[in-house]
Image (cartoon, helix red, strand yellow):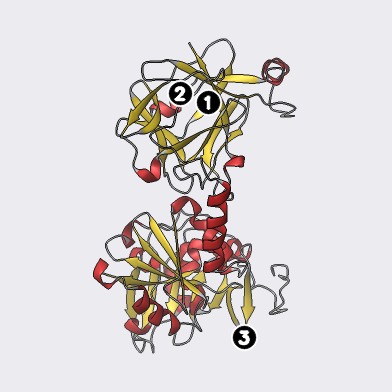
Amino acid sequence: MSVPQKPSEFSSAPMPPVRAPKARKPRLLKPTLYVHDYINLASVQKCLEDRRSDFVTINSTTFSGELELESRPYERFIVLERDHFTLFSHYHVPVKFSYKSRNAVMAHLWRADVFTDMTSTKFVEVDGLWRLEQQPVLCFAFGQDADTLRSSYVIDDNTIHEYYESTATMDMADLATVAQGKADLCVSHFFVVNRGEEYWAVDTKDPSISYTFGPSTKTRTISRLADGSITVQALIDEERLQASINAGTSQSPKFTLRDINGEEVVEGDRFVLQIPGRGDDDDEDLDDERRTMFDEKDWVTIFDTSYLVTGKEVMFVGSMDRGYTFGMAVVDDITYITYEGQFVQIENRDRFPGIVVLPETPSKHNRIHLTNSDDGLIALSRWGAKEPIVFTWMKAACGVFQIDEWYSNISHSAKLRIIKV
């Protein structure tokens, strides 16, 4: 049976035929790469996924991918060739890929029907080899951090990697020279440098131009640069413009947290936090009683902090009749919302940063920025007022606070009102 043809400006060839279905096996946790004995592995472009893979040297005259596949039921593996690599799987015939997309393929190997899954992420055939339509991004990672990095979105998968082993070797001009030598393998106008939770997008031609960003905006930032919709300098200019728009919102020693009546909130005060009601939300999963209870209320009170207290993503349920009480604390002239003596703060969990309560004072990257608005409400964003925290209603009467990486304007932030109790 042939898979329907995939439209492509590059090729009109159909996808490789699918094999007869077999029983599925639990996800493949550690990919195997077979390397022909004539291949110098040191000359093969590095990928992040290499650090979680097994490399096996094979005799090029006796090895057969098809026979190996028959001896390893339900498995899939890669064979490195001189100018391409081949994916073997029981779900389709062998598929030849360009080395440009090796990391992307390896990141998907845990899926049983890996090729079908990947074709939904814009894989195309060029000169007989399959690859992602978009060129990969060159990333430089600190060697000690590399094992903690994980692929999460296609933008993370579509990369090639190089490593530096000390901060002394993290010289942007030297890294730019390396990037210029790989211009035919990847996006040529910028590269990314990573160190811990900090990232830099660097202009390849002028490495003095660099833009700093964090994990929560990584996908958006790299996506925009990789598809050519913006340059590194334009990102810098955009941020400067936004900073001027947000002028005056940064907390200072004179910042005063205020309730809905404009009265100052000080340490020792107790208050509830209210969020706007669901409004005209038409959720078919809500029964009539719940829909009436929440739709008719302009404001609802945060009262369920069970998720927050256990360190998971915070999900709140609203009710006007009861509510947990919060407090505030000022540490080093910075105002924090507290719950039971602990700090409400941001924590990066997997790919979705959420809000948690932890005993330690938040780091700069995890602080919640509080802004008093003219209508008596407070707006929430990540510290620096660049990344809004939004509230999204979920099923029933639950919602979640999350960082919204697609905006850099606090006008998109969730707004709450404080009512003293």
- The first of marks 1 and 2 along the sequence is 2
Residue that mark 1 sits on:
316
Query: Seen in the image, is 168 located left or right of residue 45?
Result: left
Separation (CA) of disc 2 from disc 3: 56 Å
Query: Seen in the image, is 321 located left or right of residue 52?
Result: right
Most foreground residue, 406 or 40: 406
Q: Residues within 10 Å of mark 3 (few under 14, many from 20)?
A: few
**Badge number at residue 38:** none
Amino acid carrying label 1: it is Phe
Amino acid carrying label 3: it is Asp
| Element on which disc 3 rests | loop
The answer to whether 41 is drawn above or below residue 312 in the figure is below
Residue sitting at 43 percent across and 47 percent down?
A: 350
- The first of marks 1 and 3 along the sequence is 3
Residue 138 visible? The answer is yes
- Tag 1 near tag 2, CB within 8 Å: yes
Residue that mark 3 sits on:
127
| Element on which disc 1 rests | strand
Query: Seen in the image, is 17 located left or right of residue 157?
Result: right
Choose top left, top right, bottom left or bottom right for residue 379.
top right
Query: Seen in the image, is 335 located left or right of residue 89?
Result: left
Percent from the top left, x then y, of residue 162? 36, 73
The answer to whether 43 is drawn above or below residue 115 in the figure is below
Percent from the top left, x then y, of residue 72? 42, 66
**Badge number at residue 305:** 2
